[in-house]
Image (cartoon, rainbow, N blue to C red):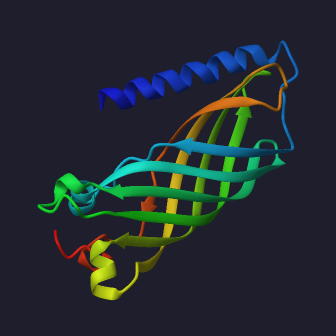
Amino acid sequence: MRIHIKSVLFIGTILCVGNLTYGQAKIFTPKGSFGVDIAVPTKANNAAFQRTFQGLFNGGLDYQYNVYKGITVGMGLKYALFNLNSFAFDNAEISGAYHMPGAYLTVGYEKFTNERVSINFSVRAGYSFLLSANDSCTAIQGNMHVSESVFVEPQIEVLLLSEKISPHGFSFQLGYSIYFNEFNQSEGLRVI
C-alpha cells in the first residue's frame, strides 16, 4: 500500500507541474508515433511457472495514432522468451524455452505536460501463441506444445524526449500482462 501511495503522489506531481507549464508554452502533440520496447520479463503469477522458468527477453514494436486530443489507438507485435531453469529439476541436462509471440490493438490517452515529457495510460488487448519447446515435449509429443491465449495488458508510461519536440526519446513503462491461460502439465513439462 505504501508503494502505491508514493506512485500516486509521484504521478500527481508530474501532472501538476505539467499543468503549470501549460500556460507558458504550446504543448507538443504528435499525430503518430512508432515505438520499440526492450525489457526483461517478470515471471508469471503461477507457482509451477515461477519454479521452472526464468525471464530472458521481452520486446515489441508498435505504432499509435493520436485520434483526438490525446486519445490514441494503435497496434503492435510483441514477443517474450523464458528459458527453462535447469536447477529446478533433478536432471541438470534438461533444456528448453517458453516463447510467447503475439499481436495486439491498443487504446490509450497521452498527455504532453511540456515539450519534452508525456504521460501515457493505455490498455493493450491481443492474441498470443504460447509455445513450450523443451526436452519433455520432444520425448512425449515429438515437437513443441502449442496453445493460444487472449491477453490484456494495462500500462502507464512516462516518455522523456531527448530534445524539445524531438522524435527520439526514452520511456519508463509499467505494465501487467494478463493471459487467459493456465500453465500446467499440458504444456509438456512432465518432470515437475
Q: Residue at x 86, y 16 (%)?
A: 25
- Vertical position of residue 170 compared to residue 81: above or below: above
Visible residue check, residue 7: yes
Q: Residue at x 27, y 76 (%)?
A: 136
Residue 155: % across, % down = 54, 46
Visible residue check, residue 188: no
**Badge count:** 0
Of the 4 image quadrants, the one containing the N terminus is: top left
Residue 78: % across, % down = 59, 58
Between 172 and 93, the residue placed more toward the observer is 93
Classify residue 167 as left or right of residue 190: right
Q: Residue at x 38, y 63 (%)?
A: 97
Between 6 and 184, the residue placed more toward the observer is 184
- Vertical position of residue 150 compared to residue 89: above or below: below
Q: What is the residue that sits farthest to the bottom in this orientation?
A: 141
Residue 65: % across, % down = 80, 51
Q: Give the quarter of the image for residue 105.
A: bottom right
Q: Give the quarter of the image for residue 49.
A: bottom left
Between 10 and 166, the residue placed more toward the observer is 166
Q: What is the residue that sits farthest to the front in this orientation?
A: 93
- Vertical position of residue 170 compared to residue 17: above or below: below
Classify residue 183 as left or right of residue 87: right
- Vertical position of residue 190 compared to residue 24: above or below: below
Residue 150: % across, % down = 50, 71
Of the 4 image quadrants, the one containing the C terminus is: bottom left
Classify residue 56 as left or right of residue 183: right
